[in-house]
Amino acid sequence: MGVRILYEAAQVLTDSMNLPCDPTLIRAVVMDTPGVAGYHDFRCRGKPGEIFADIHIAVDPALPVARAHEISEEVERRLKEAVPGLAEVVVHIEPDD
């Protein structure tokens, strides 16, 4: 029992647990979101059923801040819908260059 707990904790702490964060799925979900020009640095960690992620998205630099924020919220909503167990997503907004 104790060994299993230590093993699972080590997997979570080293980000080596097998999580359902398929890069092909992430790309499709993010790039299909209107207003997203690109993305990079997607990371997910945690354990099945309790996954935490962050991602950087690029948007048109001429967009008002409020619109860029709406796009980031839509990315978060779509990712949570597509990835089982995704509890939290932090979306960083950057201007597309």
Image (tube, helix red, strand yellow):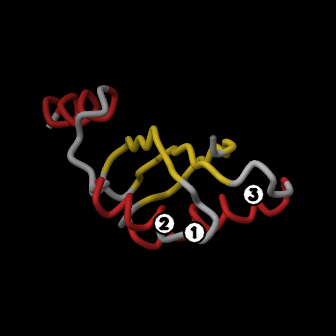
Type of the residue with mark 3: Ala
Q: What secondary structure is found at the residue carrying circle 3?
A: helix
Q: Residue 15 occupies which quadrant of the picture?
A: top left
Residue wearing tag 2: 80
- The one nearer the camera, 79 or 10, is 79
In the image, is residue 76 above or below residue 78?
Answer: above
For the residues labelled 1 and 2, the Cα–Cα distance comes to 5 Å
In the image, is residue 74 above or below residue 96?
Answer: below
Q: Is residue 24 left or right of residue 94?
A: left
Q: Is residue 90 left or right of residue 70?
A: left
Residue wearing tag 3: 68
Cβ atoms under marks 1 and 2 closer than 8 Å: yes
Q: How many marks?
A: 3
Pair 3/2: label in front = 3
In the image, is residue 52 above or below residue 70?
Answer: above
Q: Residue at x 57, y 63 (%)?
A: 75
Q: Which mark is residue 77?
A: 1
Q: Residue at x 57, y 61 (%)?
A: 76
